[in-house]
Image: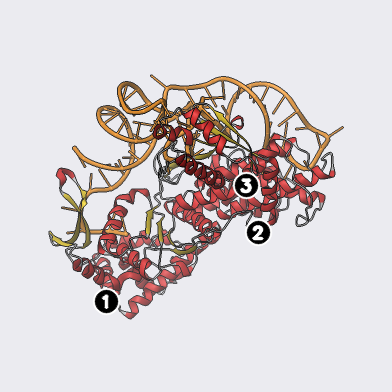
RNA sequence: GCGCCAGUAGCUCAGUUGGAUAGAGCAUGUGACUUCUAAUCACAGGGCCGGGGGUUCGAAUCCCUCCUGGCGCGCCA
């Protein structure tokens, strides 16, 4: 709709240029926006105000000229001048109703596929496999997944990359402990059931026992040298750790699996080549024994340049090196046209350097987009990073347990007559929805406060409310035993709330493309919440099954159906499942 | 010290990249269940958009400055 108005306005601009009201070849940056207030119509543009200066003309006067040049038929019923020079557009109800019919008739709810599909690589989740997944991995995993789904839905080719931490010195001590356990005849997989514990005791022995530390260091060397036995032990460890992750992904409904795992170790052999190529490009400088890339854009205090260290004094490589290798792989092997990193915002300086160096080194094509989609920290009630009651890092598995338990208890309270299996299923879906919605509905880049009480309260802007809204629509169809696939008749938009609902329904596509462009699922949450509240109001004020006429009943059923389908599809893009009853 | 980010209602957060009277949810107060799920809806109160300057038709948004908080600053990731 916006694009339609935009096209019309572009024609007007040409026209005005021909009339010499404004200079030729002008490409003004005007806006077409949805209005906040219905008295201002459905859409508004500031074009007249933007053009008033180059035209040397009062904005209201210019607005009148623009209005005179706009066509008077089709989607737009009325155009009006308002305020300092806004032009307000009022949509035609019949046109709106047609759009609703169109959306209902299409599998994709009226959301077009993008004209130019891109090959998009998305780096998200990326936990450290030495430990268990904790609350710090939540945002990357959930937000990245939602954006991946949205891009895919819009027709892009999405390649998920789980850049797991599966390499480095810490694995030495883990392998040493495995070896020790095995020698003692203990079952390793049992001990690894609690990875966090395993890590802790390995670290403890590493700190306390000289012999153990020696062995650990030796194992790192062996591992890097490609020792067969050592590699086997390492793979065994990774396998167990990855299956821990997979359990979390499955419980959370995150679309990651083993095929998406492409960890740090995958770039190991490539690292010397990266150094060599940086050298060939004339970017490498040796400083205090370390090999660095200095770029003019990155300066510290006193204007002294800041390095990106790519090789340590001792010859070891760093995450900058691995990230460069990964970037080049994504460009050359995966043929990425756009690369998104869902990584903690605190690493933004690292990514700025990384992207700059990669461009300078020719690892990236000129027109490849790379973006660091940084996210803020999950905070506790005390305003500090979220911890468990005992002060430890909150494991994701325990967080999920807790959410499911709490949601289940609340559901049970509301439905004393429900069976235990039913309650468990609803508690599970609602618990997961609570966690995910609470996270996704906040702006990605800022920190947010984690609160079970807030997210699991089934009132207001929460996951459970969204699920509840969906079940209310679903129950209408169940109650009336109506085949949703065979709804006939016109869509009538007589009541204000019906019009408002329809207006929101046809905005779905626009919201999705914003989410895809900016990597901001909270916009989709806000949209779905508005749709749900608008529906609730409609549901209260407009009888559907008991509508006064059959025509009205059919019309309202169609509004219900489209609401349900958008809610379900929208939540699915957020990675949130729905329930038919709760 | 330098740099990045934030400061919006009692609390948790939005604010469409400069637009019209700054919005939601929670909490508070009032009203609505013999009628499609009241996990809901309707209405009300609540604001120096951290302070101060500037830019312009127009600023929570852009620039400068100060205050407060968080984070990052060479061989961890």
- Residue at the (49%, 31%) spot, across then down: A62
Question: In the rendered structure, the residue with mark 3 lies on which chain?
Answer: A
Q: Is residue A267 left or right of residue A551?
A: left
Instruction: Decide: few, some or many residues near mark 1? Use Cα within 10 Å; few <14, some 14-19, many ≥20.
Output: few
- Residue A93 lies in what quarter of the image? top right
Q: Vertically, is A182 above or below A404? A: below
Q: Which residue is mark 2?
A: A107
Chain bearing tag 1 is A
Going from the N terminus, do you reach mark 2 or mark 1 first? Answer: 2
Residue that badge 1 annotates: A225
Which residue is label 3 attached to? A506
Mark sitting earlier along the chain (3/1): 1
Q: Is residue A522 visible?
A: yes
Nearer to us in this view, A84 or A222:
A84
Vertical order, A323 against A352 (above or below) = below
Please tell me whether mark 2 sits on a helix, a strand or a loop: loop
- Residue A411 at what x, y percent from top left? 66, 46
Image depth: mark 3 or mark 1 in front: 3
Q: CA distance from mark 2 to mark 3?
A: 14 Å
Residue contact between numbered discs 2 and 1, judged by CB atoms under 8 Å = no
Residue A116 location (% of width, % of height): 49, 61
């Amino acid at each position: 709709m916006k694009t339609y108005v935009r096209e019309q306005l572009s024609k007007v601009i040409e026209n005005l240029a021909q009339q010499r009201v404004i200079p030729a070849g002008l490409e003004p940056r005007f806006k077409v926006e949805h209005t906040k207030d219905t008295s201002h119509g459905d859409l508004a543009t500031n074009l007249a105000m933007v053009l008033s200066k180059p035209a040397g003309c009062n904005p209201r006067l210019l607005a009148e000229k623009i209005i005179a040049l706009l066509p008077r038929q089709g989607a737009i019923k009325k155009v009006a001048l308002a305020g300092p020079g806004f032009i307000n557009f009022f949509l035609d109800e019949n046109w709106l109703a047609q759009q609703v019919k169109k959306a209902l008739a299409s599998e994709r709810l009226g959301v077009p596929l993008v004209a130019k599909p891109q090959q998009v690589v998305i780096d998200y989740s990326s936990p450290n496999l030495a430990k268990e997944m904790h609350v710090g991995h939540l945002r990357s995993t959930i937000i990245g997944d939602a954006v991946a789904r949205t891009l895919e839905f819009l027709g892009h080719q999405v390649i998920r990359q789980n850049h797991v931490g599966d390499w480095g010195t810490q694995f030495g001590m883990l392998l040493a402990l495995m070896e020790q356990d095995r020698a003692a005849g203990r079952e390793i997989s049992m001990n690894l059931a609690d990875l966090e514990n395993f890590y802790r005791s390995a670290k403890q022995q590493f700190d306390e026992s000289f012999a153990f530390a020696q062995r650990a260091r030796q194992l790192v060397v062996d591992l890097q040298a490609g020792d067969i036995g050592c590699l086997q032990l390492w793979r065994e460890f990774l396998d167990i750790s990855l299956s821990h992750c997979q359990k979390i992904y499955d419980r959370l409904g995150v679309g990651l699996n083993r095929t998406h795992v492409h960890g740090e170790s995958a770039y190991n052999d490539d690292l010397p080549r990266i150094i060599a190529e940086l050298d060939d490009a004339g970017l490498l400088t040796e400083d205090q024994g370390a090999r660095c890339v200095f770029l003019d854009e990155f300066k510290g205090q006193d204007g002294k340049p800041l390095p990106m260290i790519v090789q340590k004094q001792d010859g070891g490589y760093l995450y900058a090196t691995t990230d460069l290798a990964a970037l080049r792989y994504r460009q050359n092997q995966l043929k990425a046209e756009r690369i998104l990193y869902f990584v903690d915002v605190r690493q933004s300086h690292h990514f700025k350097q990384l992207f700059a160096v990669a461009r300078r080194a020719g690892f990236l094509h000129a027109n490849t987009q790379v973006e660091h989609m940084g996210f803020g920290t999950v905070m506790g009630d005390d305003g500090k990073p979220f911890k468990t009651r005992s002060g430890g890092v909150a494991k994701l598995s325990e967080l999920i347990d807790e959410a499911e338990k709490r949601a289940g208890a609340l559901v049970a309270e509301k439905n004393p007559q429900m069976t235990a299996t039913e309650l468990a299923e609803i508690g599970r879906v609602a618990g997961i929805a609570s966690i995910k919605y609470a996270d996704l509905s906040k702006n990605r880049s800022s920190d947010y406060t984690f609160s079970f009480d807030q997210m699991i309260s089934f009132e207001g802007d929460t996951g459970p409310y969204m699920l509840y809204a969906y079940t209310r629509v679903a129950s209408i169809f169940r109650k009336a035993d109506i085949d949703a696939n065979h709804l006939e008749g016109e869509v009538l938009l007589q009541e204000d709330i019906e019009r408002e609902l329809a207006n929101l329904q046809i905005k779905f596509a626009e919201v999705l493309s914003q989410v895809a462009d900016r990597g901001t699922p909270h916009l989709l949450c806000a949209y779905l919440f508005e749709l749900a509240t608008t529906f609730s109001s409609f549901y209260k004020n407009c009888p559907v099954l008991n509508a006064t006429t059959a025509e009205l009943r059919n019309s309202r059923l169609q509004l219900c159906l489209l609401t349900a389908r958008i809610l379900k599809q929208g939540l699915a893009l957020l990675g949130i499942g729905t329930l038919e009853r709760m």
